[in-house]
Amino acid sequence: MQEGTSVSQHLDKMEKIIKEFVAISVTVPVGNDCSLRRSVFKTNNISFSDKLWVIPTLSLNFKTKNGRSRDHQILCMSVQQASTPKVSVSPLNLEDAKETPLNIYKPKGPYTATIVSVERLVGPKAPGETCHIVIDHGGNVPYWEGQSYGVIPPGENPKKPGSPHNVRLYSIASTRYGDFFDGKTASLCVRRAVYYDRETGKEDPSKSGVCSNYLCDSKPGDKVKITGPSGKIMLLPEDNPNATHIMIATGTGVAPYRGYLRRMFMESVPTFKFGGLAWLFLGVANTDSLLYDDEFTKYLKDYPDNFRYDRALSREQKNKSGGKMYVQDKIEEYSDEIFRLLDDGAHIYFCGLKGMMPGIQETLKRVADQRGESWEEKLAQLKKNKQWHVEVY
């Protein structure tokens, strides 16, 4: 403050500057009620005594010359903070189907789709390789979030000479609108299956996974035979847009959840306005093995009241006993809250390798016992209420 300048003069100066803020015409929904709107002012950076000040919400009391107060409530936030834009999708008639699309194309008459792109998802320190594969189906094989496609790799079935390979199922990792939001593509999350000889420790190409390697080695423009869509157990229930969804995955089991979360937080779908809680638990080996982490982290930033994200990194984190941190350890860490949410009607989903389930079931049973509950009875009730969703492979 300069010598001879009064506090009231400084406040008057601040008031004048703030009045010069530029009001811009932006309306954003308040809470979950899109009928409520509020104006947003563009924030300005203000310099006092060579210091930069960014003013968020202010409640200022200015004294007038006659001593009376002038109270001002000023809302200052950036448009980016106030409103996170979502992506428009089409065609919206994909929302009109009353029945789940099932087995439009069967193994004896698959649809020939086209590979759009194949992208490695994991870092150099991840054990193994996982790829994100976008397939163009031309809008001819529509699906819902949580369903799977079947893939028939080229070649002959070694167990049935003269016959094609068996169908391999892969959970779809996109919404019904696909990665380009036009309803013409589907994405798969595929880990390349390789096998190592126990004696030599070297990779044995003769035992490599036929379909996963075929997909991960594909190039844009390659043709791929797909069947389906199939599956109803992992469909995202949308009857209550304010419901809680607890999603538990190991590795590529995160695929259906990516579809759920894009629908909840990325896409502008007129018929589905999510206002509940989505809570994702993802178990992988290390940081380099995390899948779609950038997308999930952005949702965490943009929708902190509606999304939670917990990672279990078995090779980098320790559980409370000092052992490796697996997804069931994370579940136990938040068990009281999870049980409370389940009692309130939350849906819980499990997707990944079938080896994940015994450890999770044991953890849930132990927690139930500690709470004086019967896990068998609780599980039966969850299944009866259609809150329990499991897809393992």
Image: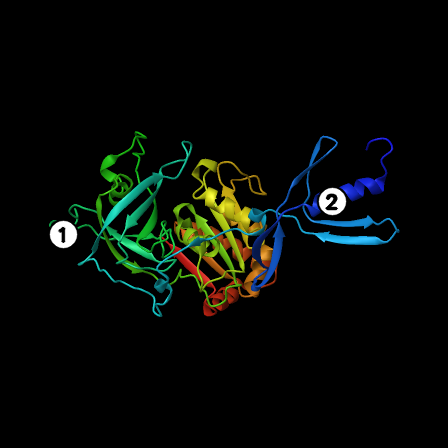
CA neighbours of label 1 inside 10 A, class few (<14), some (14 to 19), many (20+): few
Query: Foreground residue, 133 or 314?
Result: 133
Question: Label 2, on which residue?
Answer: 16
Q: How many marks?
A: 2
Residue under the point 29% across and 48% down = 135
The kind of residue on which mark 2 rests is Lys
The quadrant of the rendering that contains the N terminus is top right
Residue 330 in sight here: no
Residue under the point 40% across and 31% down = 124
Residue under the point 40% across and 61% down = 235
Residue 204 x, y percent position in the rendering: 26, 34
The kind of residue on which mark 1 rests is Ser
Question: Label 1, on which residue?
Answer: 163
Q: Secondary structure at mark 1?
A: loop
Residue 248 x, y percent position in the rendering: 47, 52
Q: Secondary structure at mark 2?
A: helix
Mark 2 / mark 1, whichever is N-terminal: 2
Q: CA distance from mark 2 to mark 1?
A: 82 Å
Q: Is residue 359 above or below residue 93?
A: above
Residue 280 x, y percent position in the rendering: 50, 51
The quadrant holding residue 33 is bottom right
